[in-house]
C-alpha cells in the first residue's frame, strides 16, 4: 500500500470504531501537488506550490447522511473527523434518497500519469512562460502555466477499495496589442497530461497574431449571424451542456432539455465524456469511470449520474459523483466533441487564417473559407443561464471577433452580447461543419476539462453590440 492507500484504510477503521458496525461509511483520501507560475505585463510575478493531503468521510447512520473532510490526517485528526460527522448525522433529517454503498468493483482503466509533470519545477514552467512572452514580440503578455499531480484512494465499509492517480499541465495566455484607440487581446489555451506537450512559443505566436489582427474593430448591428466558433468558444457550449443538460439530477427533476433516444442534435454531433484522459478512474462514491457517450450522431444517448440521481430514474451510476453532485448534480469530467472523421490529431497552436489576417486554429481554418458572410468568434465569457429547460444562455464574445465575407476575413469586430439556446444552435440541420482537429483545453471554473474542434453553425443570435 502507498501513502494514500494507507490513509484511506486507517480513516475507515477509525470511523468504524467511532460509528459501530451498523453505519455505512465511505472514505476518499487524496494527496495533491499543485504548482502555478503566473505572469503579467510580460513578467513572472508569482510562483506558488502546495502539497496537501485530505480525507473526505461520508456516513449513513440511522437513516441519516452526513459528510465532512479534514486536512488533519494523523489519527487524532481522523478520529475528530469521525466524531464530527457522527454528530452531524444525528442532527440532520432523514435521507430518503440514500442509494446505498457502491459494491466492490474493479476500475476499467487508469488516469494519465507523467512523472515529468508530477515533478515539474518552477524553472520548467518559466521556460514555457518565457517562450510565450518572447513570441508575443513586444505585446503585453499575461497568464499562467500550472502543473498538478493527484493520488487518491477510496474505501467503504462494504469492502470496496480503489486507487488511482493522474497528472495535468495547463497553459492559458493572453497577449494585448494597444495600437489604436481600443486594446485588442488574443488568447491561447492548452492542456495535457504531459508538460512536454506545452509549446509556449507556438501558443504565444498565435495569441500575439490574434491580438494584432483585432485592432480598429468595426461595430455590427445585432442580428442572427452565421458563425465559426473556435475551440475556446466551443468549450463554453460543452461546459453548459454538461452542467445543465447532461446532468443526472437536472434530468431526474425534469429541468433538463435532454430526451434520451431522440435526435436532438445535428447528425454531425457526437459528444462523449472521457474521464480516463483527464482525471481519476473512479468517482467520490467509488464507482469506476469509463467513456460515456452522451450524444451519438446527433441522437441523445445518456446523462451523467451519481448513485443518487441514478436511483431516482432507475438507472446505474456512470461514475460522476462529486463533492456537490447531490445538491448541484453529477457533471461530466472531460467533455469531448468529436472532430470531423478525417481529423484525429490535436493542434494546440493553429496558424494564420485567410491572408494571415486573423489567425485561427487549424480546426477552424477550412470552416472560415467555407463561410459566405458571418463571424469568426474566438471566445465566450460571463455566460449565464436564462432558461435552464431550453438552455438559453446569454453572454459576451471575447478575445477576438472578425467579419468573414466570401471566405475571407475582412475586418475585426467589436465584442457583442448574445442570447442563444445552445441545443438549438447545435440542432438538426444547424451544424454546417466541424473542424478536423480537436484541441484539449484546461477547465474554466467547474473542474471540467474539454476537448473541442471548431464549429461552423448556421445561426447565432447576437443581441447587442459595443454601444449597448
Image (cartoon, rainbow, N blue to C red):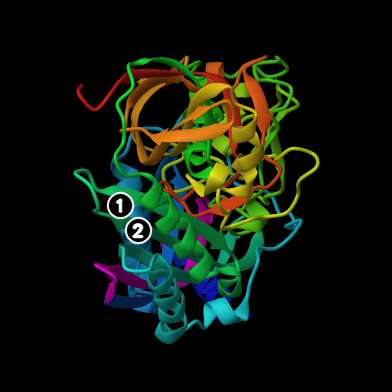
Position above or below: 53 against 371: below
Horizontal and vertical percent position of residue 227: 52, 26
From the viewer's perspective, tell me whether residue 73 is left or right of residue 349. left
Is label 1 in a helix, a strand or a loop? helix
Q: How many marks?
A: 2
The mark found on residue 87 in the picture is 1
Q: Which residue is mark 2?
A: 175
Mark 2–mark 1 Cα distance, whole angstroms, equals: 52 Å
**Quadrant in which the C terminus appears:** top left
Q: Nearer the viewer, residue 468 or 312?
A: 468
**Quadrant hosting residue 302:** top right
Horizontal and vertical percent position of residue 223: 39, 13
Question: What residue is at 60 percent from the left and 51 percent from the top?
Answer: 439
Q: Main secondary structure of the magenta part?
A: strand
Horizontal and vertical percent position of residue 95: 43, 33
Question: What residue is at 53 percent from the left and 56 percent from the top?
Answer: 21
**Quadrant in which the N terminus appears:** bottom right
Amino acid at each position: 500500500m502507498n501513502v494514500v492507500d494507507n490513509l484511506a484504510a486507517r480513516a475507515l477503521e477509525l470511523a468504524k470504531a467511532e460509528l459501530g458496525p451498523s453505519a455505512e461509511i465511505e472514505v476518499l483520501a487524496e494527496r495533491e501537488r499543485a504548482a502555478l507560475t503566473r505572469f503579467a505585463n510580460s513578467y513572472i510575478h508569482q510562483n506558488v506550490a502546495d502539497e496537501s493531503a485530505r480525507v473526505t468521510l461520508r456516513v449513513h447512520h440511522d437513516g441519516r447522511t452526513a459528510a465532512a473532510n479534514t486536512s488533519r490526517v494523523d489519527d487524532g485528526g481522523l478520529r475528530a473527523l469521525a466524531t464530527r460527522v457522527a454528530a452531524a448525522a444525528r442532527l440532520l433529517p432523514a435521507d430518503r434518497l440514500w442509494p446505498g454503498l457502491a459494491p466492490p468493483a474493479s476500475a476499467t482503466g487508469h488516469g494519465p500519469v507523467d512523472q515529468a509533470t508530477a515533478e515539474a519545477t518552477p524553472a520548467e514552467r518559466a521556460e514555457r512562460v518565457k517562450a510565450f512572452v518572447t513570441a508575443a514580440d513586444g505585446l503585453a503578455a499575461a497568464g499562467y502555466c500550472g502543473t498538478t499531480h493527484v493520488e487518491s484512494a477510496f474505501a467503504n465499509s462494504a469492502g470496496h477499495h480503489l486507487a488511482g492517480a493522474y497528472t495535468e499541465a495547463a497553459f492559458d495566455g493572453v497577449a494585448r496589442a494597444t495600437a489604436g484607440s481600443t486594446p485588442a487581446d488574443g488568447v491561447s489555451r492548452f492542456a495535457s497530461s504531459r508538460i512536454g506537450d506545452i509549446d509556449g512559443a507556438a501558443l504565444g505566436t498565435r495569441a500575439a497574431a490574434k491580438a494584432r489582427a483585432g485592432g480598429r474593430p468595426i461595430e455590427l448591428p445585432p442580428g442572427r449571424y452565421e458563425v465559426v466558433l473556435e475551440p475556446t468558444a466551443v468549450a463554453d457550449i460543452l461546459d453548459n451542456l454538461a452542467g445543465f443538460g447532461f446532468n443526472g439530477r437536472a434530468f431526474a427533476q425534469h429541468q433538463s432539455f435532454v430526451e434520451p433516444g431522440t435526435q436532438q442534435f445535428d447528425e454531425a454531433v457526437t459528444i462523449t465524456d472521457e474521464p480516463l484522459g483527464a482525471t481519476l478512474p473512479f468517482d467520490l462514491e467509488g464507482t469506476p469511470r469509463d467513456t460515456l457517450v452522451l450524444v451519438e450522431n446527433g441522437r441523445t444517448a445518456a446523462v451523467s449520474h451519481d448513485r443518487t440521481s441514478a436511483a431516482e430514474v432507475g438507472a446505474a451510476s456512470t461514475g460522476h459523483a462529486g463533492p456537490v453532485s447531490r445538491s448541484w448534480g453529477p457533471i461530466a469530467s472531460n467533455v469531448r466533441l468529436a472532430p470531423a472523421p478525417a481529423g484525429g490529431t490535436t493542434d494546440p497552436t493553429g496558424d494564420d487564417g485567410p491572408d494571415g489576417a486573423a489567425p485561427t486554429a487549424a480546426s477552424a481554418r477550412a470552416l472560415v473559407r467555407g463561410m459566405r458572410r458571418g463571424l469568426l468568434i474566438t471566445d465566450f465569457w460571463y455566460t449565464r443561464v436564462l432558461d435552464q429547460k431550453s438552455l438559453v444562455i446569454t453572454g459576451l464574445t471575447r478575445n477576438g471577433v472578425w467579419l468573414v465575407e466570401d471566405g475571407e476575413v475582412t475586418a475585426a469586430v467589436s465584442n457583442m452580447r448574445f442570447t442563444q439556446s445552445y441545443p438549438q444552435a447545435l440542432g438538426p440541420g444547424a451544424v454546417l461543419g466541424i473542424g478536423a482537429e480537436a484541441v484539449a483545453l484546461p477547465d474554466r471554473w467547474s473542474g471540467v476539462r474539454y476537448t473541442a474542434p471548431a464549429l461552423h453553425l448556421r445561426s447565432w443570435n447576437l443581441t447587442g453590440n459595443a454601444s449597448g
